[in-house]
Image (cartoon, rainbow, N blue to C red):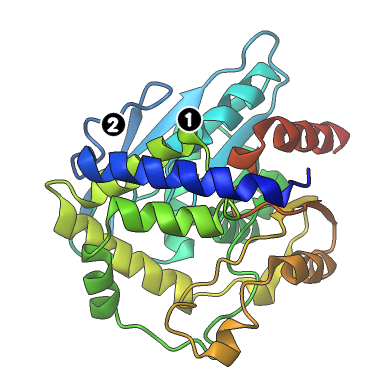
């Protein structure tokens, strides 16, 4: 899985060419990603929460061929959507799994409420309501990035209904606030999110998500995020994003990994450097946070029934960087447990 450093220069050249294209013709989408094509039909779960009528969009994909009787629920990250699980949905479905991939409230194709007290507990409860509606009593929960924090909280709230837990480069493997990262107010996050651009997203994702590399297929996901943030619902999208960042920063899960009771797989791209607030942290603090080469090993020791799989020299999204290798290891572990 290791990559030659000689690939870096052409990758950067390709990224520069692609960034010109992004700047010239970046698409925009509606506040619930209207206009963006999902890989499978969108369905809607309507419910009331915090005196507000909400709609959670989700994909429910049946097993292809002979069903194995198991359901997998995919939880996306902060800058991702259910749609970004496209390759995983296809692979898991082909292996006999029913796959449910929701967009959480505040994200992507789901509602962006004007006022909402975001918590991982609330998002977990919302997701549990969806699964109850679908008649799903037990599932394997797979969470990536921020979805890893949510998957952890879900597994802690509903341990008897989670048969297996998979965390893919989850954030929240450390408590950034306790390590010295300064607090941003929601208003400060809001102003930051209003400035989001396709070029800024691409640069950040290339350096962090893909360890300096770039492939043409990544452009679709840059356009998805930037198009949502630059569309007619820009202010609503930015405001919900700000509230969500505050949730992520102030609600650590690292102290409760020890309480997980189900078999847990940690899948870690060890070149990842994601850390909330690293851009405003002092140099000494920034140097010690987001070190996934260390964090994966540390957290694997905290979780009672854990297996650690590391992807050397991969970044924040190994399921997108090398889908074939990622899914091979995922399916082997699922079959063995």
- Badge 2 crowding class, 10 Å Cα cut-off, few under 14, some 14 to 19, many 20 or more, is some
| Marks 2 and 1 in Cβ contact (< 8 Å) | no
| Tag shown at residue 134 | 1
Residue found 48% across the figure and 30% down from its top: 134
Callout 1: SS: loop
Relative to 231, is 205 on the left or the right? right
Question: Considering only vertical position in the picture, is 320 above or below 285?
Answer: above
The image position of residue 91, as x and y in percent, is 64, 24
Q: Earlier in the sequence, mark 2 or mark 1?
A: 2
Residue found 52% across the figure and 36% down from its top: 85
Question: Considering only vertical position in the picture, is 91 above or below 316?
Answer: above
Q: Which residue is mark 2?
A: 36
Residue found 77% across the figure and 53% down from its top: 312
Q: From the image, which quarter does the N terminus lie in?
A: top right
- Badge 1 crowding class, 10 Å Cα cut-off, few under 14, some 14 to 19, many 20 or more, is few
The image position of residue 188, as x and y in percent, is 26, 79
Q: Is residue 132 visible?
A: no
């Amino acid at each position: 899985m290791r990559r030659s450093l000689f690939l870096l220069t052409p990758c950067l050249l390709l990224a520069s060419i692609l960034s010109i294209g992004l700047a010239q013709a970046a698409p925009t989408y509606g506040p619930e990603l209207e206009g963006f094509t999902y890989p499978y039909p969108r369905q809607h779960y309507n419910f009331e929460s915090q005196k507000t009528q909400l709609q959670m969009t989700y994909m429910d994909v049946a097993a292809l061929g002979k069903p194995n009787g198991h359901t997998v629920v995919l939880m996306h990250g902060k800058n991702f959507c259910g749609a970004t699980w496209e390759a995983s949905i296809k692979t898991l479905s082909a292996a006999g799994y029913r796959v449910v991939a929701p967009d959480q409230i505040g994200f992507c194709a789901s509602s962006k409420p004007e006022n909402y007290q975001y918590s991982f507990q609330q998002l977990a409860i919302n997701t549990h309501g969806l699964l109850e509606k679908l008649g799903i009593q037990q599932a394997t929960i797979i969470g990536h990035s921020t979805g890893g924090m949510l998957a952890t909280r879900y597994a802690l709230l509903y341990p008897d209904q989670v048969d297996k837990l998979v965390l893919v480069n989850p954030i929240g493997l450390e408590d950034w606030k306790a390590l010295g990262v300064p607090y941003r107010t929601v208003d400060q996050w809001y102003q930051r999110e209003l400035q989001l651009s396709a070029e800024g997203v691409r640069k950040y994702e290339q350096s962090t998500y893909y360890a300096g590399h770039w492939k043409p297929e990544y452009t679709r996901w840059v356009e998805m995020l930037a198009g949502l943030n630059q569309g007619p619902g820009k202010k609503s999208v930015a405001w919900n994003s700000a509230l969500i960042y505050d949730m992520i920063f102030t609600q650590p899960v690292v102290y409760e990994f020890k309480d997980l009771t189900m078999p847990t797989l940690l899948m870690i791209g060890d070149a990842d450097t994601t850390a909330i607030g690293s851009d405003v942290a002092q140099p000494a603090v920034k140097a010690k946070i987001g070190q996934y080469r260390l964090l994966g090993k540390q957290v694997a020791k905290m979780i009672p029934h854990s297996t650690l799989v590391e992807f050397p020299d991969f970044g924040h999204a190994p399921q997108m960087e090398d889908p074939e290798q990622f899914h091979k290891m995922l399916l082997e572990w699922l079959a063995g447990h």
